Image: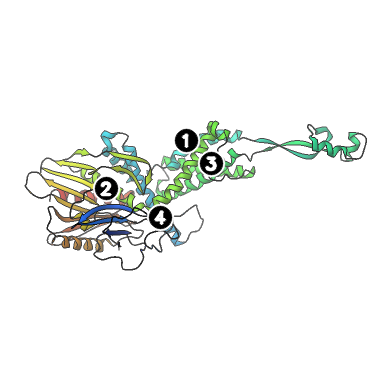
Amino acid sequence: MIHLARPWDSRGLTGSAFGPGDCLVSEVRGAAAKLSGHSLLMRSNVRGENVDLVLHPYPKGGTGHGPARVNFPVRPRGQKEAETPEEENSRELLRRMNEVLARVQELGESLEDPLHVWPRLRQAWERAENEEDPRMAEIVRQAQAIMPKLKALEPRIRRVLRRTRELTPLSRVQEMDRASMLWLVRQPGRTIAERAGASQRILATVRHENFDTPENRVVHAYTRLAFDVSREWMREHPRAKMSRRYGQVETYSRFCRAFARMLEDLDVSVAETGVTPNYVLMQDPNYRAVYEAWRRLLEEEKVLDDLWAWQAETWTDFAVLAIVLALDEVEEAELIAQSPVVWRSEATLGRWFEQDRPIAVFWLKGIGRIVEVQSRPEVPGPLLPLARAHVSLRITDIKRNEMPRRVAVWTPHSMMRLDLSEAVNQANSRLVELQRVAQSEVLRNGLILTPSHGAPEAQFAESQRTRVDGVAMEASGEGLRYGLDAIRAFARSEIYR
């Protein structure tokens, strides 16, 4: 297994371990790689030898199987008043990951109308270019749906009467049990008044209101968690303070905080995760809604751990969707085929959907060319494995008797910003080496799509026969608009080349 800091590297990793600036890609030759601890990006056969391109996850913390990975940021949890620079960097990485997730998850909403998937997705991404219109999230939905439930519970929060034995004035005694009676007969005196003594009190059973019930513990746990999640969401969208969604979440955050303080004053403890729901949590509509919302937020926290580890896979899906949208906006491009997209209820190894190959086919009637967008191809051809690019464009000119032309698309993802100028030069050198290989298709150009980490830019490197363009982009705001414009320009220049 050869570990690679960049997919186009000619040599393996210099050190013995991956660092936060590396892409965590490895090439396995010979026997097929066992899918344990890594994800298969592309499988091929090069000169009779099996070659697998695999991706390793970012570490969740501690050590794990696979190659050594050191000094990686850890996913932030909860809120802190003061954070170290490393914690602030991790929180910013989490914010960017959530933006990429939101763009990919918008495909799931677009699939509700199969005839207009890409127009609907384009509209959603155009809204994302405006940072003042924040993304939909689970906490936004709950701010709209659960607020009325909590308000209905507040004046009638469930309580129980618990029996205790206390010294009670004779005039207030209502109930006595066996232990109280035994206490009474042991006291000196002939009448009850004499036995009550000077204080005129006897041991009796009394009932006190108690709010520490299983269902109220769940509400307490939920309001504390909802407050933390809403604060995190508001922190990720500082420019959206004037939007309706931001206002809803802010109001919900204050309400949950006040509700949690009220429950704390009533001595209600906090439910542990995995609690078994009782009759009230299952049958009372308001308590049941709060319980289900609590479970969804807890599950989202667990899902974030896996998404953090496999966010490089999610970035690849985001890049593929960006390419399809760019091609769909080419003036004469007509979408003539689209593979079925199966949306998953939860992500598997960072991937939210499955699709056949290619994901989309465009027909340009004027120039007589067909453009296919391929992601993680089952039959990648002879040159893509050598370029180590698991996304590509395949351009076929049906008017000429020429070999199909491939465009390699790399989607490198790392916890630190790539030097884009260096990347395009190294990738271009890789393509120059491939020109010596005689094959049945042409691969001369490439595209690099990588996270910009707040500094979007475009670079290119070219030689006499090859060219590689690089685009560093974001998944929201100006960085998304800049990246989509750069991909559109590249797509037009490549198609009409």
Relative to 166, say whether 455 is above or below: below
Nearer the camera: disc 2 or disc 1: 2
Residue 87 visible to an observer of this rendering: yes
Identify which amino acid the numbered label 4 is placed on: Glu
Q: Earlier in the sequence, mark 4 or mark 1?
A: 4
Q: Looking at the rendered structure, which numbered label has been put on residue 320?
A: 2
Nearer the camera: disc 1 or disc 3: 1
Identify which amino acid the numbered label 1 is placed on: Ala
Identify which amino acid the numbered label 3 is placed on: Phe
Residue that badge 1 annotates: 145
Classify mark 2: residues with Cα within 10 Å, few (<14), some (14-19) or many (20+): many
Mark 4 to mark 2: distance in Å? 24 Å
Quarter of the figure with residue 200: top right
Q: Quadrant of the N terminus?
A: bottom left
CB within 8 Å, label 3 to label 2: no
Quarter of the figure with residue 436: bottom left
Q: Nearer the viewer, residue 80 or 241?
A: 80
Residue 328 visible to an observer of this rendering: no
Q: Nearer the viewer, residue 97 or 246?
A: 97
- In the rendered view, how is the structure colored? rainbow
Query: Residue 136 at x, y = what percent?
Result: 39, 41
Q: Looking at the rendered structure, which numbered label has been put on residue 92?
A: 4
CB within 8 Å, label 2 to label 1: no
Q: Is residue 433 left or right of residue 23?
A: left
Mark 3 to mark 4: distance in Å? 27 Å
Q: Is residue 402 left or right of residue 469?
A: left
Mark 1 to mark 3: distance in Å? 14 Å
Residue that badge 3 annotates: 255
Nearer the camera: disc 3 or disc 2: 2
Q: Secondary structure at mark 3?
A: helix
Q: Is residue 202 left or right of residue 310?
A: right
